[in-house]
Amino acid sequence: MFSVPSYAQEKSAVDSSKLTMDKMIDSAQMMVDSAIALIKELNNEKESYAQVGVGVGNSLFSVHNNALNAKQGSSAFVFMPSVGYYHKSGLSLSAISYLLKEKKMFGVNQYAVTPAYETPAGKDIDFLASYTHYFVKNEYSNYSSPVQNDFYASVIYKKPFIQPGFAIGYSFGEYKDVRRLDTAIAGIEKHFYDSATNKIKTVSAIVSVQHEFDWNDVFKKNDGIIFTPALMLNLGQDNATSDAHTNIGLDPTLNTPARKALGNRLNKLLTKRAAKLQTTPFQAESAGLDLAAQYAIGIFSVEPHAYFDYYIPSSNNSTSNRFTQVYSINFYFSIY
């Protein structure tokens, strides 16, 4: 038999106590780390990033408001390089350049700058507020936006399977139009013109329902697809005023019927780019189907988008084309 000295027993008790304390500290630290990770997950904490992109499409009037884009009367194939900075708080600033071919010339038609705020992803409520200012190079161009200031806000409740949404928009601006008619009356060559400055204000309210489909690890590990179809009812009110000038009335050789006939001929030359932006009361304007998708892998993403609109009112000349399609596909690289 042998005995253990008392000092050894005391040392063993101290070591055991220290080991227990270390385990408690490690366990507490793990709980803190887990709590922090959970908080980050719940808040869907993300990094700020910059984004460079290029796209093609036919959207000219608004960055976010499909109801406004559906009112464009002129359609063109537009090349759209873009750049943006997106802060993790939800604030962002982006810019787009619109390049297209007009009168056999290819170049920049207009620019758009958009400051915005959107709640970070992962929330039950998705809120977006934005303002876009369009810098138009040629107000007489058939493909320039008649809207230079575009305010837009939307909210979507994303918790249920069918997600309801509501959006409002307020836009205003002006565009110019000139029509020229060269003809001969009684053997005398005549040159007539009709120019106008048109001012537009439009208010839109959009009610929608949508569902967001998500797929992960589709083609490769860590890639993903989001597809969001939405049904929309667009309501709105438009106000349009025009300050016109013509030289038809200055010709003393023309009688009243001749002046009216020439005026009608000039009106036929009127551009159709804002045919659906006439003065109207607040009413249901159109119904639409919006299809938006996103595929992302690493720092690369591609976002195709299509919107199909049916115009409801039957007044004025706006019913010449009730169906409108707005489409785009954008390719982005993100820099974290």
Image (tube, rainbow, N blue to C red):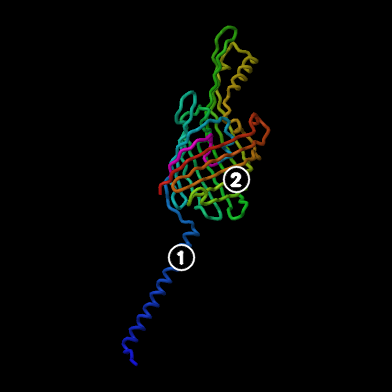
User: Per the image, is 62 magenta?
Assistant: yes
Q: Which mark is residue 71?
A: none
User: Per the image, is 171 magenta?
Assistant: no
Instruction: Inspect the image, locate mark 1, and give the three-letter code of the amino acid beneath it.
Output: Ser
Depth order, front residue of 267/199: 267
Please report the residue visible at 65 percent of the width from the left and 15 percent of the height from the top.
Answer: 257
Q: Residues within 10 Å of mark 2 (few under 14, many from 20)?
A: some
Of all residues, the one furthest to the top in this rendering is: 187
Mark 2 lies on residue:
229
**Left or right of 159, for residue 99:** left
Q: Earlier in the sequence, mark 1 or mark 2?
A: 1
Instruction: Inspect the image, locate mark 2, and give the three-letter code of the amino acid beneath it.
Output: Pro
Please report the residue visible at 43 percent of the width from the left and 44 percent of the height from the top.
Answer: 333
Mark 1 lies on residue:
34
Which residues are the magenta region? 51-64
Please report the residue visible at 53 percent of the width from the left and 48 percent of the height from the top.
Answer: 225
Across and down, in percent, residue 88 comes to 44, 52
Depth order, front residue of 170/227: 227
Placement of 57 over or under 208, stated as above or below: above
The secondary structure type at the circle numbered 2 is strand
